[in-house]
Amino acid sequence: MHMLFRLFGPRRRKNQEEIASRAAEVIAQVLFDVGLDRFLAGTVLLDRQFRLHFYAAPPVSSRSVLAAIAMHELDEARVFRSHVLGAGIDAPTLACHTRIMADGIMRELRARSPALCALPATRRERRLGARPFSRRS
């Protein structure tokens, strides 16, 4: 039953804000898993389902990849490296620079992927209470 619902049920469309927040999650996770040097030597890919993938080695290009970014190409990565080498990876530094890195990744992904630019910026929520009430005379 669950499989039928997933096949024929309504799908929620992704938006750019969700992908940016996922980019921040990927950055934080990869930094703690592989370290700063391997992170900055890696590549972030965006696939056709708008999922982000990190590869420590350069991946093989395929049709399922919408865009690929080498982390060392980002200006934000150089700034992040200098701050982390000076202060170390602590929670405030990581929180600040992760958001900056995610913004840099999204900027480059938008520049390289027209499909990502076509997604809505944020999710428009439908709420019954959000509509203004009109007065009847």
Image (cartoon, rainbow, N blue to C red):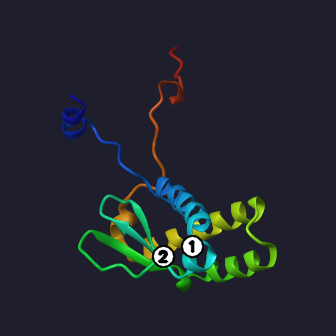
Residues at marks 2 and 1 touching, judged by CB atoms closer than 8 Å: yes
Residue at position x 56%, y 70% from top? Answer: 34
Outermost residue toward the right? 87
Viewer-nearest residue: 13 or 94: 94
Q: Quadrant of the N terminus?
A: top left
The amino acid type of the residue labelled 2 equals Glu
Viewer-nearest residue: 132 or 23: 23
Question: x, y (%) of residue 134?
Answer: 52, 22
Toward which corner of the image does residue 90 lie, by quadrant? bottom right
Q: Which residue is mark 2?
A: 108
Q: Residues within 10 Å of mark 2 (few under 14, many from 20)?
A: some
Question: x, y (%) of residue 63?
Answer: 23, 73
Viewer-nearest residue: 84 or 69: 84
Question: x, y (%) of residue 137?
Answer: 52, 14
Q: Which residue is mark 1?
A: 104
Q: Is residue 100 above or below residue 69?
A: above
Residue at position x 25%, y 31% from top? Answer: 2
What is the spatial separation of the Cα atoms under label 2 and label 1, in whole angstroms? 6 Å
Kind of element beneath mark 1: helix
Question: x, y (%) of residue 32?
Answer: 61, 64
Kind of element beneath mark 2: helix
Query: Could you tell me how many numbered marks the image carries?
Result: 2
Q: Is residue 114 above or below residue 123?
A: below
Residue at position x 47%, y 58% from top? Answer: 19
Outermost residue toward the top? 137
Q: Residues within 10 Å of mark 1 (few under 14, many from 20)?
A: some
In this image, 118 relative to 27: left or right? left
The amino acid type of the residue labelled 1 equals Gly
